[in-house]
Image (cartoon, rainbow, N blue to C red):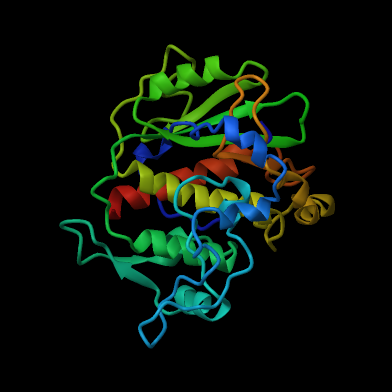
Amino acid sequence: MDVNAVPTPPVSPRMNRASSEPPTPVSAGAKARKGRRASDAASDSSSDVETCAAITKAGKRCKNKVKTPAALDVIAPSPGAPVVRFCGVHQKEVVSSVSGFYSKKAGMTDQWVKFDVYIPENLQPDTKAALRVEMEKARSASDVEGYIYAFEIRDPDAPDVFHIKVGRAVNLTKRIDQWSKQCGSKEQTLRGWWPGLVDPSETSLLKGRVVAGEKGANCHRLERLIHIELADLVLHQPHYNTANDDSDEESKTKKSKKARLVTPRGPCADCGTVHKEIFSFQRPKGGKYVGKEWEKLVKPVIERWGEFVELYV
């Protein structure tokens, strides 16, 4: 089960909720793929995975190949559609051509949504491009109401790593119960859910005491946006490499050591499944993020994208 200074807009009171269902487990055949390189994950879904997603001025699909896989396809690959990627030329166009878009939400089509209000400046260009594409999409008729939840996975054998499982669920209390029974060797602690109160002073996070509250709309879209950004934070660790980060030198060099966390996960020793949607952050040795991985890294991402989906999708 191996698993920021971010410009965030004002957050509404509802933003403390987090709800989601743990990644869909993959068993059996997953064992055969256990030894594959992480970079291979992005080339499984279709023959176009490594082809630029842009349309040329001639109206045809760009034929340029994209060699570097998206962060999400490395950190937490899923059987769904791969993250949209662009060649160097078209990536620059997507990231810098316009500052925003008009919302496609009914009754909100005159609202201009600025990309940089929701997309942090310190993310990688390919991540920014992927988030822009996801933001601008119209609401899917097949999307459902649900929760985005976050479980911290406490591993005594890896105290220098913060594991957080972020997924979606239609029934939050049922998902909490499933996780507590599924894997016994690691302690799972609910940190919060969306849309719902994450502040411990407002509600209980104990199993059997959680009052889920109302569901949020467009749960699939929200989960996708959150995962794309979290994968970038895990893989590239921009929060340890910014000018206003007051962490010590050792913490700032963690970026060069990220490869040891980017390894395909094998079947869980407890339940035999290959868990997905688990994001593993190296714990810093000093600075403002020490012991604050949930409060300063993960929770703000859930809140920010929760607000975006609620207002504009």
Location of residue 263 in the rendering, given as x and y in whole percent from the top left corner: 71, 44
Location of residue 184 in the rendering, given as x and y in whole percent from the top left corner: 63, 15
Among the 4 quarters of the image, the one containing residue 97: bottom left
Question: Left or right: where does residue 113 sit relative to residue 223?
Answer: left
Location of residue 116 in the rendering, given as x and y in whole percent from the top left corner: 45, 65
Question: Left or right: where does residue 93 sit relative to residue 138?
Answer: right
Q: Residue at x 65, y 30 (%)?
A: 267
Location of residue 244 in the rendering, given as x and y in whole percent from the top left corner: 67, 60
Q: Residue furthest top?
A: 208
Q: Residue at x 40, y 59 (%)?
A: 134
Q: Residue at x 36, y 35 (%)?
A: 195
Among the 4 quarters of the image, the one containing residue 276: top right
Q: Residue furthest bottom?
A: 58
Closer to us: 122 or 265: 265
Among the 4 quarters of the image, the one containing residue 202: top left
Q: Is residue 220 above or below residue 153?
A: below
Q: Is residue 255 above or below residue 271?
A: below
Query: Exactly how many numbered labels are in the figure?
Result: 0
Q: Residue at x 53, y 17 (%)?
A: 180
Closer to us: 142 or 50: 50
Closer to us: 204 or 149: 149
Image quarter where the N terminus lies is top right
Question: Left or right: where does residue 150 sit relative to residue 255?
Answer: left
User: Does any portion of residue 97 appear in the rendered image?
Assistant: yes
Q: Residue furthest left?
A: 107
Q: Is residue 264 above or below residue 199?
A: below
User: Does any portion of residue 205 appear in the rendered image?
Assistant: no
Question: Left or right: where does residue 287 sit relative to residue 297?
Answer: right
Q: Is residue 217 above or below residue 130?
A: above
Q: Residue furthest right?
A: 250
